[in-house]
Amino acid sequence: MKDLFDDHGSDDLATVLEAWERVLHRISNDIPAAWFSRFLRPLKPTGIDSGEITIAAPGRFVLDWVKERFSDRIEQYLTDEMGRPVSVALVAVPRAKPEEAVATVRPVSLAPTGVESFAPNPKYTFESFVEGQSNRMAVAGARNAALNPGLAFNPLFIYGPSGLGKTHLLHAVAHAIRESRPKATVMYVSAQQFAQDYVDAIQNKRMEAFRRQLRGIEVWLLDDIQFISGKDKTQEELFHIYNSLYMVGRQIVITADRSPRDLNMIDERLSSRFEAGLVADVQMPDFETRCAILRKKAEQLAVSVPAEAADYLAEHVPGNIRILEGALTRLVATGSISHRAIDVAMAEDLVEKYYRRSLERPSTQAIIEVVSRHYKIPVHEIKGSSRNKPIVEARHVAVYLIREVLGSSWKHIGSQLGDRDHTSIMHAHKKVAQEMQDNRDKLSTVQMLGRSVDPHFGNQAN
């Protein structure tokens, strides 16, 4: 059997940086904004070696603060996001002196090392992507965009929860285009990186170079567009660049955690353009697809996993594909470390030890009762027709929590809250989501209620 850790060196820093952005987003939901900006945002992954990720902190004070409060959580979240066990080494680096900071301001870049040198992750190809009923439209759209860039499906907008393969598809498109058109200028960038590059361009008075470089690309792969929510100036710049690329037939592929019309605090001009091409969702995979994903992962690890053990994980490990693959990696590691053959009993032990708590899902009624107790409003009034402001607020929060915790359909939620129309349920969810962005007290209240019914509430990377 191939050693589980033989191929860890193949992970490059770009993969770690992508995972790190998702980790930061999860942590940002859990702590005050001032703490996040002061202590977590300045942390920077600087390398990975044999499964150990080095993260640099600006100075000893920040290092000690993070080590004391967040080192275990950072390691846990990175393990989830990387899809396998990793360790973290936090190190302190001296803060740059003012004159050094001026001298080391990085030039505007459109990708981690520039457009021309962008290399898609070798693991993220169409061949390694497991297609199923839950993602068929998105895969078809991505293949078509790679085969005929700028033609039928432009833009291609892929949306769905974190960890279901959206970034994988972006890199697969890049691979396919590079194979058929080696000289094509393909650019992948996260929306968060785009926003940072835009700010850097303004600060360094390089806006013209920034625009010229972007408008010269042939394929634009823009990941996690929801991260520019509320950034009006960034959206304005993205709008003009989008138009300039679209008008000359450049292929644009965008991902987000929700559909264009459900994006909060995104300019309507942008969201309407996102809907002009193909909008395709990726959903949680069904049992058969989860089994196929585990078989593919076992092939990549070059290990033999009995079908019964893989099926047990597919059925009992909750969460997205990344978590599912991480469970298989943990199972293989357990067998390797203990020198035991993998079997279904080992899979059962692993689920009981690491995932049983996550399987305990609250009912819709339990969530409504939690909201009822907090707002001191009877359940029958929350489900009733009253338009009294406190009752409406409680009802809206119940809608938001049911959707986010259970993933219930709009129609089902409406049926549980007085047979309300699905459009009013969608409006309630969107209203609470926006209030959480605008009001720190509302954010804290909803997160507190969410965690009272689901300990992992707010830990998903959106």
Image (cartoon, rainbow, N blue to C red):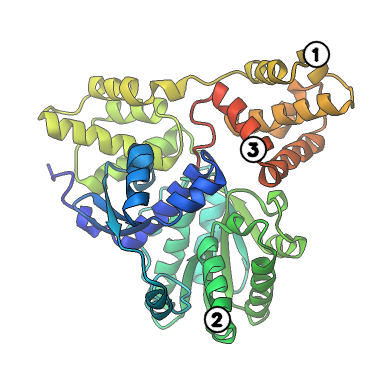
Q: Measuring 75% from the left and 16% from the top, which residue is drawn there?
A: 376
Q: Earlier in the sequence, mark 3 or mark 1?
A: 1
Residue 145 x/y as whole percent: 54, 67
Callout 3–callout 1 Cβ contact below 8 Å:
no
According to the picture, the residue beneath numbered tag 3 turns out to be 443
Determine whether 5 is above or below 414 in the image. Answer: below
Query: What's the CA distance linking mark 3 and mark 2?
Result: 35 Å
Q: Earlier in the sequence, mark 3 or mark 2?
A: 2
The numbered mark at residue 380 is 1
According to the picture, the residue beneath numbered tag 2 turns out to be 210
Q: Secondary structure at mark 1?
A: helix
Numbered marks: total: 3
Residue 65 x/y as whole percent: 37, 44
Query: What's the CA distance linking mark 1 and mark 2?
Result: 56 Å
Q: Secondary structure at mark 3?
A: helix
Label 2 sits on what residue type?
A: Phe
Determine whether 388 is above or below 177 in the image. Answer: above
Label 1 sits on what residue type?
A: His
Query: What's the CA distance linking mark 3 and mark 1?
Result: 25 Å
Q: From the viewer's perspective, is 297 left or right of 136?
A: left
**In front here: 351 or 34?**
34
